[in-house]
Image: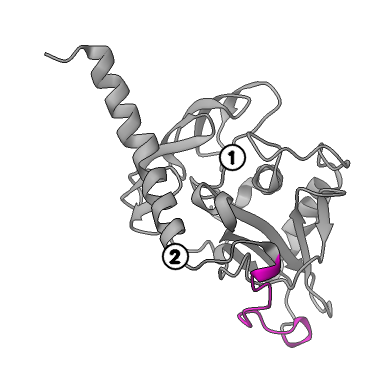
């Protein structure tokens, strides 16, 4: 009979490595852009011109990244405008130069050729109340100097967006399970999950466990996340993200 240790190793391999191997095979067989210069970074046209939308609005996006990184992770960013403003403001973190970028791309642009997915989209007075918190979180981001960016385990683009979401727990949202770097903290953390609806234990974003109403149940191993969601039934697998029901876009503050 196989030993318990062998069965455990087989289970870990099946859960954490098989999905990544499948993603890598799809990438190798596909025709996705292999470099920044080959990719489409244009607007998707899904957002109206800021002048055409008068109320305040706050949006959280994610988009599958490209080249080999797309096997593992998505990229995420924040977009907002106050009431009456004539331009959207977008914040991302990238891995070259000064990490925090303002309006480096169109607010609703493709990321490495991939259309963005909306995680949260709040308008009106609710957005107006949250925007100052977002701006403060961007201003106070602890890893904003050149050289601070680290692709793994963080701080990276998803570490930045997660830090902003922690500053606005009223949204009650969390980044996708395959947003590698979202769980990064500089040390050992035990406390509430990003959404404020559960509990989490994490060691530098390299290993951890969390359980919450928004997050579901997740195990983090070397920055890769596996688990399940009960609220909107789905499996969470490394590289893949969700298999099952997709949660609806948060369009109003949770009570």
| Residue 10 placement, left or right of 170 | left
Is 33 rendered above or below residue 5? below
Can I make out residue 130 in this image? yes
Is 23 rendered above or below residue 128? above
Sequence-wise first label, 2 or 1: 2
> Residue 246 appears in which quarter of the rendering?
bottom left
128 vs 114, nearest the viewer: 114
Judging from the image, what secondary structure is the residue with disc 1 in?
loop
Image location (x, y in percent) of residue 88: 78, 73
**Quadrant where the N terminus lies?**
top left
Can I make out residue 237 in this image? no
**Disc 2 to disc 1, C-alpha distance:** 35 Å
133 vs 6, nearest the viewer: 6
219 vs 125, nearest the viewer: 219
Is 152 rendered above or below residue 240? above
Image location (x, y in percent) of residue 166: 66, 42
Name the dominant secondary structure of the magenta segment: loop
Looking at the rendering, the stretch of residues picked out in magenta corresponds to 37-52
Q: Residue at x 62, y 54 (%)?
A: 75
């Amino acid at each position: 009979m196989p030993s318990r240790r062998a069965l455990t190793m087989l289970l870990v391999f099946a859960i954490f490595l098989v999905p990544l191997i499948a993603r890598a095979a799809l990438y190798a067989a596909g025709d996705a852009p292999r470099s920044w210069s080959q990719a489409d970074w244009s607007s998707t046209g899904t957002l109206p011109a800021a002048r055409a939308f008068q109320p305040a609005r706050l949006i959280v996006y994610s988009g599958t990244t490209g080249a080999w990184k797309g096997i593992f992770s998505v990229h995420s960013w924040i977009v907002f405008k106050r009431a009456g403003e004539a331009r959207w403001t977008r914040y991302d973190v990238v891995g070259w130069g000064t990490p925090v970028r303002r309006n480096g791309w169109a607010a609703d642009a493709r990321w490495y050729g991939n259309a963005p997915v909306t995680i949260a989209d709040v308008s009106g007075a609710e957005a107006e109340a949250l925007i100052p918190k977002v701006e403060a979180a961007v201003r106070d981001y602890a890893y904003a100097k050149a050289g601070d960016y680290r692709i793994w385990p963080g701080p990276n683009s998803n570490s930045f967006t997660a830090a902003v979401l922690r500053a606005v727990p009223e949204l009650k949202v969390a980044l996708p399970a395959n947003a590698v770097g979202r769980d990064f903290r500089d040390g050992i953390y035990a406390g509430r999950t990003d959404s404020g609806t559960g509990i989490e234990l994490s060691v530098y974003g390299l290993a951890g466990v969390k359980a919450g109403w928004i997050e579901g149940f997740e195990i983090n191993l070397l920055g890769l996340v596996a688990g399940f969601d009960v609220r909107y039934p789905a499996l969470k697998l490394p590289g893949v993200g969700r298999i099952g029901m997709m949660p609806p876009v948060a369009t109003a503050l949770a009570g």
